Image (cartoon, helix red, strand yellow):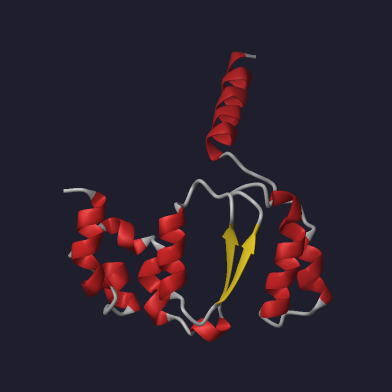
Amino acid sequence: KTLYDIYEKEWPKVRQMSLHELLSSKEIHPLFKIDPISYAHLLDKSKISLIDALFDRTLSLTSRKSLYKEMEGAKRYILPISHVSWLPFEYFLARYILHKVNINDKEAASKILTREVLQIPIEDELTESYNRQDEMNN
């Protein structure tokens, strides 16, 4: 069976599930648990804005059209970007999201400009282990 066959068979059941059922069901394919289309029926579409990347190769046009169909009533913005070319504009997108959810305080706005520090736990562990070995040898 192809994934498309599985989706076609299970989709009617998924559309009727509650959030709890979606997250806990063992009767549906695991991809339904991470696919945004699975949750569309649970949302108030009048409060949704979809930002569609015109040149996105990560999500197929067919998938994006299906999602938009399920999100009927949501605002849709089609932007001439790809899956990652929007990154230089992430500040503006973050500001837009804060505006849409009515968060207007300066503290939230200042956090947008904060750079995230990536931590690699295995690297930290290896460094600590190396330092302990070095101390024992000296």
Residue at left offset 55%, top offset 40%: 121
Q: Residue at x 51, y 82 (%)?
A: 73
Give the camera-side residue of 31 and 106. Answer: 31
| Depth check, front residue: 20 or 129 | 20
Q: Residue at x 40, y 65 (%)?
A: 66
Q: Work out whether residue 58 or residue 100 is closer to the camera in this orientation and state it.
A: 58
What is the total number of numbered labels drawn onto the structure image? 0
Horizontal side, residue 80 vs residue 109: left or right: left
Tell me the residue at 62%/18% (across/down).
134
Measured as percent of width and height from the top left, residue 43 is found at 45, 81
Figure quadrant of residue 138:
top right
Residue 41's image quarter? bottom left
Task: Using residue 49 as the reference point, say whether residue 42 is left or right of it.
Answer: left
Depth check: give the residue in front, 109 or 82: 82
Horizontal arrangement in the rendering, residue 20 relative to residue 94 (left or right): left
**Which quadrant of the view contains residue 65?**
bottom left
Q: Can residue 11 be seen by looking at this rendering?
A: yes
Reply above or below: 89 against 111: above
